[in-house]
Image: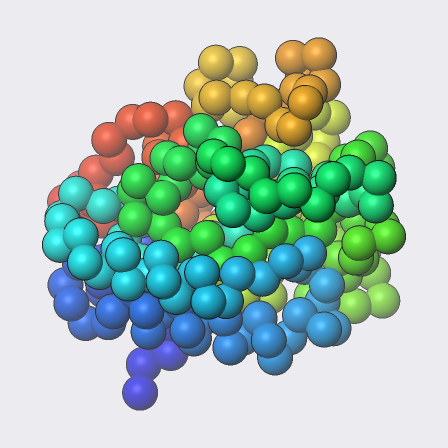
Amino acid sequence: MTSWAGRTAAEISAAVREKRVTPREVAAEHLARIERLDGRVGAFRAVRAEAALAEADEVAARGDFDRLPLAGVPVAVKDNLAVRGESTRVGSAATPDTPADRDHVTVARLRAAGAVVVGLTNVPELCVFGTTDGVLGTARNPWDPTRSAGGSSGGSAAAVAAGMVPIALGNDGMGSLRIPAANCGLVTIKPGHGVVPTGAGDSDWFGMSENGPLATTVEDARLMLSVLAGDEPALRSEAAP
């Protein structure tokens, strides 16, 4: 039996397009890995198990896999970006537990590309710190749980490094992608101004914050960044060798 947890986003999307695996099978395997590991890692503030499986079925029903660069790829979202139907807590007990009525544009682009949102990841309170230790959860480094995953996109980085998702969405004002990527051994990029739509909660850190990818490979980071930027990336099967 082929295992999909721990595979790259490019590998998963290619397999879904070639009908070697279904989006539901991929989502279920990653959700099982989250259930098994996250009690130790603390990457997720909220896991969308039933909703993610339903979204995976919606992707399968679309039937346009050749147009979906992230077909069936599980993705995690930093808990300062709106996910429709989920609250955005920004690591604080003082924020309202009110479901968002729409996705942030970056989340909407990931979904439009075929990605399946499996959960929202832990952040430090109000995303202020370079470690992810907060009242709603503490993200630990999967390589050594006695150490920090970094911050403020620490939950997203921990989820990718632990193989609970192949890619995750975070953002960076003063190192909040780069610090956890360095701590957890991942690939990231803080996009230049205007490349990816900004806005994180009610603030983009006075124009300093940019939304961007966390991944295990340059190929996955490029693929996710292309989707976030609204480009039409070449699918893996079409890319030059």
Q: Is residue 206 left or right of residue 215?
A: right
The colour style of the image is rainbow
Examine the rendered structure and indicate whether residue 198 appears above or below residue 161.
above
Residue 37 can be seen, yes or no: yes
Q: Is residue 160 left or right of residue 175?
A: left
Examine the rendered structure and indicate whether residue 180 appears above or below residue 11.
above
Quadrant where the image shows the N terminus: bottom left
Q: Is residue 192 left or right of residue 238?
A: right
Examine the rendered structure and indicate whether residue 29 appears above or below residue 112.
below
Residue 109 rendering spot, x and y as whole percentages: 37, 35
Residue 90 rendering spot, x and y as whole percentages: 73, 39
Examine the rendered structure and indicate whether residue 82 appears above or below residue 206.
below
For image coordinates 86% across by 52% down, the residue present is: 135
Q: Is residue 60 left or right of residue 79?
A: left
For image coordinates 23% across by 45% down, the residue present is: 68
Residue 130 rendering spot, x and y as whole percentages: 81, 39
For image coordinates 30% across by 48% down, the residue present is: 114
The residue closer to the viewer here, 79 or 187, is: 79
Residue 136 rendering spot, x and y as whole percentages: 80, 54
Looking at the rendered structure, the number of numbered marks drawn on it comes to 0
The quarter of the picture where residue 124 lies is top right
Residue 225 can be seen, yes or no: no
For image coordinates 56% across by 38% down, the residue present is: 100
The residue closer to the viewer here, 6 or 205, is: 205
